[in-house]
Image: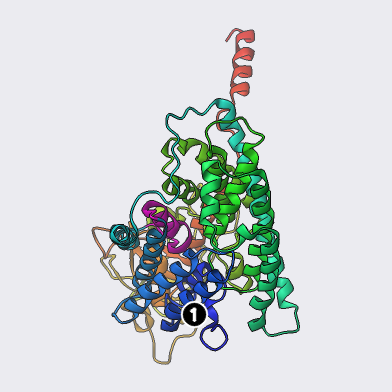
Amino acid sequence: MARYGSERIRGHGIPEAIEAILIRRSRVEPRVAVLKPISAAVSIGSGGPFGAEGPIIMTGGAIGSILAQHMHLSADERKALMVSGAAAGMAATFDSPLASVLLAIELLLFEWRPRSLLPVVTAVSTATLLRTPLLGQGPIFPVDLGYLHVPALASTLCVVAGVAGGLLAVVVTSLVYFSEDTFAKLPVHWMWWPAIGGLVVGVGGLIEPRALGVGYEVLGDLLSGRATLELIIGILIVKCLIWGISLGSGTSGGVLAPIFIIGASLGALEGLVFPAVKPGFWAIVGLAAVVGGVMRSPLTGVVFALELTHAWPMLLPLAIASTAAYGTSALLLRRSVLTERIARRGYHLSCEYDVDPLEVLRADEVMYAQPATLGADDPLVAPLSILTTEVPRREGRPGERSDPLQRLFPVLDQDGAVIGVVTWRRLQNPPEGARTVKDVMNSEPLVVGAGETLRTIAARFAQAEVGAAPVVDWDDPTRLVGLITVEQLLDGHLRDFSEEHHRERPLAIRRRRAGMQLRSRRGE
């Protein structure tokens, strides 16, 4: 199916969904919507150690993308519908609406805006409501904790559990891509890789049969505290190995269910050593930790664990463990198991959310306030002082670069109103017959307002293919207040870089105390 149908059905589906969003403008082939669930059903039904959520995410995303491609929409609008379908599939699988929304935000949307969040929440809510008559409602793995009091020692040990989950996430991620690299060296076509991976899965099944398939029954035993030591160790070792190797072979299947089981088995093993709190407590902690570490989605890991079990009193321990695992994984691995494949294809992906410095700075905060200007009736032979004008920088700006030469000159009429612009190169090489600045100026230049953000100005620069523009008063568009260039856009990022890396101590308590003691000795 992958070779003769669509190669995009290989693997667990989430990297393919990310790639469709970032690279293919949220366009998914219709055949993927058909072949992905069939291929996943074959691999899981024959014992593959996968979950159905990855194929459902890809299939739901394909349905949303196909629907969007039949409508007159932009790429961002197609992305919103594609992610809505993917999140709806996730919500229908696990009855986890909030975790599905968080997964969409942390892994697929790459933004948090009303234009994308509202469609996703609408689709997730619809899927959750339709799930009730079709599959029932309630937690998939109910855990009755009753009255839960988590001692301070147990909360502290959640940090240890989180670090252990992060380390396991590093091992599992490394195993997946070591397996993928090993298969790539084989002298056979990639179509045969899943068959070879299936042999490994079969051997693992002979050792621990309960490691095969989705394994929801095993997960239920782990979360309820009924699992034996033999089952815990067998699942932890065998499931990790056969899942990582088979996923590296390109077999179609999901990652969430195996991660849940691996994390719960790690937590159950820790529960044999850590102080007892409630049956299944440490298994749930381990589940959230490994999800946060493997997927680099700490909030999704917490909410997934809560919605799967309805163990709501465990919010704080899960947050501690998932965050500790996320921090450990981020320190030791550059990318997660979901984004490494995208990076290997030559594309950069960042899942970090930050305020765009160009969005918070305005033109009047970074512009050159006193640029050199020309009159419309000035003779074309510009004086050398004009052509070598350096634009003074504003005080307090980061960096020690020298003042740049002015390359664009606003042209004013007799009343001081902006009527055009002329470039430095145009002044040096005027056309024949041109006598005054008016003959060579651009009478319809791009003009920006003093209150516009740098992000808006950057978009306008790119659209007009210019690198500088006069800045005019917001209330009087003819009154010149400054000049802004592409350099100011870089200065916006430079200021953000300075705030992130420049360390200082504004309140020096010791220095102030020493100064007061010195003045008291002097009798001041």
Left or right of 113 on screen, residue 44: right
Visible in this render: residue 328? no
Amino acid found under the numbered disc labelled 1: Arg
Please give the name of the residue rendered at 59% of the width and 15% of the height, measured from the top-left corner: 516
Magenta stretch: residue 322 in it? no
Quick one: SS at disc 1? helix
Residue 325, percent from left and from top: 60, 46
Q: Observer-nearest residue: 329 or 278?
A: 278
Q: Is residue 468 above or below residue 256?
A: below
Q: Is residue 80 above or below residue 192?
A: above
Colour convention of the picture: rainbow
Visible in this render: residue 500? yes
Residue closest to the far left: 475
Q: Observer-nearest residue: 127 or 449?
A: 127
Q: Observer-nearest residue: 512 or 334?
A: 334
Q: Main secondary structure of the magenta part?
A: helix
Total label count? Answer: 1
Q: Residues within 10 Å of mark 1 (few under 14, many from 20)?
A: few
In the rendered structure, which segment of residues is drawn in magenta? Answer: 95-112
Magenta stretch: residue 105 in it? yes
Residue 517, percent from left and from top: 62, 13
Residue 96, percent from left and from top: 39, 53
Which residue in the protein does label 1 denote?
Answer: 425
